[in-house]
Image (cartoon, rainbow, N blue to C red):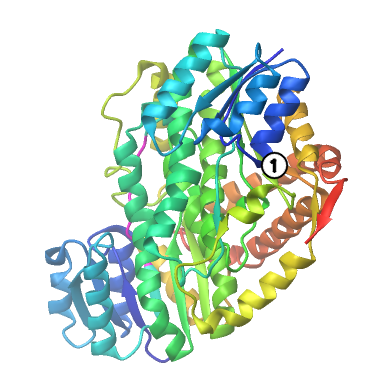
């Protein structure tokens, strides 16, 4: 397998870290980026020939452009662009803080878009590439107290699906990565509401015990699956990470289809009267 | 008899929905960024129509409109988040400012209206939030990826929200219209810049759009009325037969892909 060149955001911990380490260990080139440059410096030192450690805050367009410039200068190309940086606001919609909701979208969605937009002219010019956007199982299946986080991840899915169709003609692939529960710092770093409402405490309690009992996958295993995806000629539009995520998505699709069937007649009646063509 | 608060009533679905609900005897807080566009409606239904300014990007107008509706009607049974607009351009062509504005109106505006309405809905012990999304909230195609991102976001928001609000007797439904002859067609912005690389895509999409039959918005509005009258309304409903088929096809493709890649997914947390 020829060496691949990666550009990965959010490599301080979690999936970004695991993916960078696995790719470097097999001899790939990696631009290892994080908003905290010091948190990725060790990889640059350990792999001086194949790792480029960079400080990139995805909410800072100047840093995104400089990071991509540095990666293209050093490696000449980017085969796999991995948009991994993200975090969760874990609050009921009613108790959520508007500024925090926007700050979450800044990283999870607008930051991802910034990286994609800045990379696309060069990916199109090289005539190939694979964009892997970290959504979540929460990009396909939403839940209570996570509705706002899921909204940001559904947004990633909706953007990625259309983007994949826009870029197919340029030889560029797009995959939404949908991990379930993994042993990353994701849960610990979730932002709880500043002023929690007692009305939502029963829900919070039941979610706590539900999440506490979930089996957690190891990020290195998902990283290995992504190496495999990067090597395949064909790639999926959406990739559930882990069998639990797979099952949740499968069950949700089934439930959504059943609901669609149930309401089919009402759906179909809605456009019986055509007003105009064009 | 239901009491409604509807955003974006100057034209399109919001306008027709307000008219139909008023015509059947419901009370409607019809809202718009420019309330002067609602003068005829208020004149025709002086006792049941409340004409209010509500710009979803201005929290002060959201708060005052909800307070006025509650004050006037005593309760709000149905909140309809309908205000929105689109941009038609490749991801690479749409400017940061356009993307921010899209999300400000189509996503954050919806979240902010819901957050502001919830204390009223919870206190009165029930209600129904209807979020108008789009067939583009269930499937995404070239040049509308960012509009779809907004509408997907509202679908994801609504699904979790409906579970969050079940204990309070509050229902949440997303209505995803296909092609309807609303003024929406004229409220789709071009991208900030055009790149020649996407010319063929623009030509292809434009010819699809030009060839489409656009249905009377009254049909979608009738669907919304039936949904809010249903004892057990759906969480998601598609408005229009063609849109229904398009969503069904995408879901079938997703199921197929899911099964094709199952082993790789399974290996990702096998340890």
Q: Chain of mark 1?
A: A
Q: Is residue B13 visible?
A: yes
Magenta-tinted stretch: A83-90
Vertical order, A173 against B229 (above or below): below
Image quadrant in which the C terminus of chain B is located:
bottom left
The residue located at (16%, 84%) in the rendering is A48
In this figure, which residue is indicated by the disc labeled 1? Answer: A255
Q: Nearer the viewer, residue A28 or B202?
A: B202
Counting from the top left corner in percent of width and height, residue B252 is at 74, 58
Counting from the top left corner in percent of width and height, residue A81 is at 39, 74
Counting from the top left corner in percent of width and height, residue A203 is at 44, 24
The residue located at (22%, 82%) in the rendering is A70
Vertical order, B133 against B251 (above or below): above
Q: Nearer the viewer, residue B38 or B174?
A: B38
Instruction: Bin the neighbour count of mark 1 within 10 Å (Cα to Cα): few under 14, some 14-19, many 20 and up.
Output: few
The residue located at (78%, 27%) in the rendering is B226
B168 lies left or right of B209: left
Dot 1 lies on which element? helix
Task: Say if the magenta span includes residue B143.
Answer: no
Image quadrant in which the N terminus of chain B is located:
top right
């Amino acid at each position: 397998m020829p060496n691949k060149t990666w550009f990965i955001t959010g490599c301080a911990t979690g999936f970004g870290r695991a993916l960078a380490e696995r790719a470097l260990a097999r001899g790939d080139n990696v631009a290892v980026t994080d908003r905290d440059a010091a948190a990725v410096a060790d990889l640059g030192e350990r792999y001086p020939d194949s790792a480029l450690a960079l400080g990139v805050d995805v909410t800072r367009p100047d840093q995104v452009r400089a990071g991509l410039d540095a990666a293209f200068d050093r490696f000449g190309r980017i085969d796999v662009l991995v948009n991994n940086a993200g975090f969760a606001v874990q609050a009921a919609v009613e108790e959520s803080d508007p500024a925090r909701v926007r700050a979450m979208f800044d990283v999870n969605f607008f930051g991802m878009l910034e990286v994609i937009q800045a990379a696309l002219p060069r990916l199109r010019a090289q005539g190939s590439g694979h964009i892997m956007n970290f959504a979540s199982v929460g990009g396909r299946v939403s839940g209570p107290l996570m509705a706002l986080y899921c909204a940001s991840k559904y947004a990633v899915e909706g953007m990625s699906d259309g983007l994949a169709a826009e870029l197919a003609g340029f030889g560029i692939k797009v995959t939404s990565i949908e991990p379930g529960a993994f042993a990353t710092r994701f849960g610990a770093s979730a932002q709880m509401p500043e002023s929690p409402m007692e009305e939502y405490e029963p829900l919070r309690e039941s979610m706590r015990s539900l999440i506490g009992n979930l089996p957690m996958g190891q990020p290195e295993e998902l990283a290995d699956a992504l190496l495999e995806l990067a090597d395949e000629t064909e790639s999926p539009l959406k990739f559930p990470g882990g069998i639990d995520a797979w099952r949740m998505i499968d069950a949700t699709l089934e439930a959504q289809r059943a609901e669609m069937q149930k309401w089919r007649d009402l759906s179909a009646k809605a456009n019986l009267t055509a007003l105009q063509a064009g | 008899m239901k009491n409604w608060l509807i955003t974006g009533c100057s034209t399109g679905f919001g306008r027709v929905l307000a008219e139909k609900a008023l015509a059947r005897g419901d009370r409607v807080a019809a809202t718009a960024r420019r309330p002067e566009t609602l003068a005829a409606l208020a004149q025709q239904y002086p006792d049941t129509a409340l004409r209010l300014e509500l710009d979803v990007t201005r929290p002060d107008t959201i708060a005052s409109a909800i307070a006025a509706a509650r004050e006037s009607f005593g309760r709000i049974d149905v909140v309809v988040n309908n205000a929105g607009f689109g941009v038609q351009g490749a991801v690479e062509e749409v400017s940061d400012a356009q993307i921010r504005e899209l999300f400000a109106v189509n996503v954050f505006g919806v979240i902010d209206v819901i957050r502001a309405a919830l204390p009223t809905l919870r206190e009165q012990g029930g209600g129904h939030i209807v979020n108008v999304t789009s067939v583009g909230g269930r499937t995404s195609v070239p040049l509308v990826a960012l509009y779809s991102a907004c509408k997907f976001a509202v679908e994801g928001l609504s699904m979790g929200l409906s579970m969050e609000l079940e204990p309070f007797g509050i229902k949440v439904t997303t209505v995803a219209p296909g092609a309807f002859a609303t003024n929406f067609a004229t409220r789709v912005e071009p991208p900030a810049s055009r790149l020649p690389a996407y010319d063929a895509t623009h030509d292809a999409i434009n010819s699809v759009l030009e060839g489409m039959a656009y249905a009377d918005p009254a049909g979608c509005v009738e669907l919304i009325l039936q949904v809010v009258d249903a004892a057990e309304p759906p969480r998601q409903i598609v408005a229009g037969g063609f849109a229904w088929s398009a969503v069904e096809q995408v879901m079938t493709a997703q199921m197929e892909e899911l099964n094709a890649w199952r082993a790789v997914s399974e290996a990702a947390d096998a340890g």
